[in-house]
Amino acid sequence: MAAGIVKRHSRSCLSRDGGRCNCTPTYQAWVSVKRDGRHAKMRRTFRREAEAKGWRTDALAASNRGALLAVKRDTRTVAEALAEFVADMEAGIARPRGRARYKPASIRGYRQQLRRYFEPSWLGAMKVPDVRRANVQRFADELIAQGLAPGTINNVLDPMRAFYRRAFERDELAYNPTERIDLPDPGGGRPKRIAPASEAAAIIAALAVEDRPLWATAFYAGLRRGELQALRCCDVDLGASRLHVERSWDQMEGPIDPKSESSRRTVPLLAILRDYLDEHLLRARREGDELVFGRTATLPFAPMAVGKRAKRVWKEAGLEPITLHECRHTFASLLIDSGTNPKAVQQFMGHSKIQTTFDTYGHLFPGSHDEVRERMDAYLEAARQLAAPA
């Protein structure tokens, strides 16, 4: 038996007297912690030895960095703790790392996952400190068996991840059981539909005149749907050929801050888009803080209605439908095709990290195996000729 772990049997077990074991043993793990300036033992009991070893390894690591203290045991269930966590998110007490507040859509999503998956589940009924990584993995495996997609399961686990990460970082728990959960590969997040430049022009041209500016802005500026809904006339600088993204739109809250600080950005206003917006603003007779694409000057367009109307037109024209978000992907591909460097692509797309840009669009950047081989062959051949004796 590993150090710091004790195998325990029930009182009626024959093995206590040297006979044959007829019970299911448990495994108690312990680590030394500080309490009131003195050392004491923190103990946890598990059904499997591997779980006991995993907890002790995590607890020892936390103890070595001084993060494991003998604090009052959290007696809440996971569902109760997540409910309080969501309430703290709404109040602004719990916030995401590096940002001031959680977005309203994130809070609604967390509450939905809590009610649908955690409150009725066995995992939601467990006590917060008793949850092991094996428990979270089993929960995820059950969701996979139910046919949920990996991306959906990630969304389900998100509130639990956020809660345990925050508790761990604030030394309220000795470890984070939601780390390193094994899920099937969701596919890398690559866009499923990107329209070539010629197809994008045809898709826009097929629409009614009043719908073209919205779709052109999605294609040629890459704004997210909420950013398109919240775009104001004062955000469109025709004189400087720039488009400023200063806010987004939430279906319940109205105008909100962008997705992240990086989402607050300036996008170059391409000549082809400038023509669409110039005509649109003259026709709509809007200005200042009024919405560029709103149903009214203060009410945003309804994405579902806009999408249905466009699909009907494209079907009649024999064109493949596309969504506003896929138009955003198309804008990224146009930037890359035109030779824009990755850092600029990141900035114009409003990505917080360059890794997000590479993960999503890396396959579009020049540099295939054949291209790299040909460039390297040419480079090395030129170097060889320079080094050759006259």
Image (tube, rainbow, N blue to C red):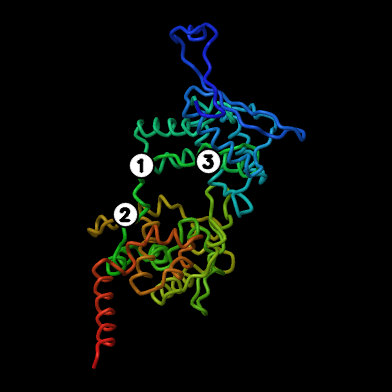
In the figure, residue 298 lies in which quadrant?
bottom right
Viewer-side residue, 63 vs 76: 63
**Side of 249 relative to 214 (left or right):** right
Which amino acid, by three-letter code, is at mark 1? Answer: Pro
Which amino acid, by three-letter code, is at mark 3? Answer: Arg
At horizontal 47% and vertical 73% (from top left) the residue drawn is 268
Pointer 1 local density, CA inside 10 Å: few below 14, some 14–19, many at least 20: few
Residue to which mark 1 is pinned: 184
- Farthest residue in the front direction? 18
At horizontal 46% and vertical 56% (from top left) the residue drawn is 225
The answer to which of marks 1 and 2 sits earlier in the sequence is 1
Disc 3 and disc 2 in contact, CB within 8 angstroms:
no
Which amino acid, by three-letter code, is at mark 2? Answer: Lys
At horizontal 43% and vertical 68% (from top left) the residue drawn is 345
Q: Nearer the viewer, mark 1 or mark 2?
A: 1
Label 3 to label 2: alpha-carbon separation: 28 Å
Viewer-side residue, 271 vs 71: 71
- In the rendered image, residue 385, in percent from the top left (x then y), is placed at 25, 86
Residue to which mark 3 is pinned: 161
Residue to which mark 2 is pinned: 192
Pointer 3 local density, CA inside 10 Å: few below 14, some 14–19, many at least 20: some
In the figure, residue 362 lies in which quadrant?
bottom left
Pointer 2 local density, CA inside 10 Å: few below 14, some 14–19, many at least 20: few
- How many numbered marks appear? 3
The answer to which of marks 1 and 3 sits earlier in the sequence is 3
Disc 1 and disc 2 in contact, CB within 8 angstroms:
no
- In the rendered image, residue 203, in percent from the top left (x then y), is placed at 30, 63
Label 1 to label 3: alpha-carbon separation: 18 Å
Above/below status of 225 relative to 244: above
Above/below status of 269 relative to 207: below
Mark 2, secondary structure of its residue: loop
**Side of 387 relative to 286 (left or right):** left
